Image (tube, rainbow, N blue to C red):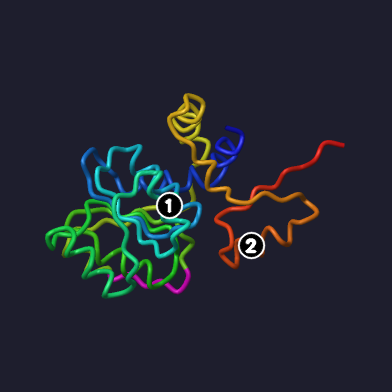
């Protein structure tokens, strides 16, 4: 539970912000870009908000296992136009009701906007780098674009803290490795090299 409470300071609240920004409703089909800690928490948040089909854009088996435990129903490993075609094929050509962009790259943002159905909202929390939005394209399809830094305290106080304390969610499993402060460089290297999803630091008692 301590690990799950720790996620509320960042990754769980940020994933929840993506889902809230995308305005997920009961019965929606949601697509989640990113299989890091935030993206995985986005999957969990989509499930928490009532999405019944959750497509995770993941190509890593270890992260897919966590995503499935969090509620992912499908996985798409393709990227770019191939990914767009795959998602459209899975949704009868309409696209997703809600899209969570938890990466920030140009390719991820471009693909996220293309897999959103007409009238959907893309909730973006990935720090954008090199991103250019097709504003006219979004305009004519009535696709919304929302998101930014997460209002962590608001989500925690209004819902997430209670969900963790009641045992309804366990986002702490995104911490797949533990380190001490003496090994902090290795903790960052493990995340950078994708040897772990998220590193947990434990401070030994003196």
Task: Inspect the magenta stretch and tell me whether residue 131 lies in it.
Answer: yes
Q: Which residue is located at x 32 percent, y 38 percent?
A: 49
Q: Position of residue 31 (x, y in %)?
A: 30, 55
The answer, for residue 11, to whether it is visible in the render is: yes
Eyeballing the image, is 9 above or below 162? below
Residue labelled with disc 2: 190
Quarter in which the C terminus is drawn: top right
Q: Position of residue 153 (x, y in %)?
A: 53, 36
Q: Residue furthest left?
A: 92
Q: Which residue is located at x 39 percent, y 42 percent?
A: 45
Q: For mark 2, does the 10 Å Cα neighbourhood hold few (<14), some (14 to 19), or many (20 or more) residues? A: some
Quarter in which the N terminus is drawn: top right
Q: Position of residue 107 (x, y in %)?
A: 38, 72
170 or 162: nearer the eye? 170
Q: Tell me the number on the disc at residue 117.
A: none
Task: Please tell me whether the stretch drawn in magenta is mainly helix, strand or loop.
Answer: loop
Q: Is residue 117 left or right of residue 126?
A: left
Q: Which residue is located at x 58 percent, y 58 percent?
A: 196
The answer, for residue 20, to whether it is visible in the render is: no
The magenta span reads 129-134
Q: Which residue is located at x 16 percent, y 58 percent?
A: 91
Eyeballing the image, is 6 above or below 122? above
Q: Residue furthest top?
A: 166
Which of the two discs, 2 and 1, labels the residue nearer the N terminus? 1
Task: Inspect the magenta stretch and tell me whether residue 182 lies in it.
Answer: no
Q: Is residue 176 left or right of residue 64?
A: right
Residue labelled with disc 1: 65
Q: Residue furthest right?
A: 206
């Amino acid at each position: 539970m301590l690990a799950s409470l720790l996620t509320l300071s960042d990754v769980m609240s940020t994933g929840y912000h993506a889902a809230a920004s995308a305005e997920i409703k009961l019965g929606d089909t949601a697509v989640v870009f990113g299989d890091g800690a935030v993206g995985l928490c986005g999957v969990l948040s989509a499930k928490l908000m009532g999405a019944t089909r959750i497509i995770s854009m993941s190509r890593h088996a270890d992260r897919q296992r966590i995503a499935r435990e969090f509620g992912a129903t499908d996985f798409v490993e393709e990227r770019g136009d191939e990914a767009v075609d795959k998602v459209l094929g899975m949704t009868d050509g309409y696209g997703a009701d809600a899209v969570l962009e938890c990466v920030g790259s140009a390719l991820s943002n471009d693909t996220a906007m293309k897999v959103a159905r007409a009238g959907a909202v893309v909730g973006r929390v990935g720090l954008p780098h090199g991103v250019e939005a097709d504003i006219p394209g979004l305009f004519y399809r009535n696709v919304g674009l929302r998101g930014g830094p997460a209002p962590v305290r608001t989500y925690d106080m209004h819902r997430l803290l209670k969900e963790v304390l009641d045992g309804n969610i366990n986002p702490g499993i995104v911490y797949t490795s533990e380190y001490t402060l003496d090994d902090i460089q290795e903790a960052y290297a493990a995340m950078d090299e994708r040897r772990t999803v998220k590193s947990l630091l434990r401070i030994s008692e003196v």
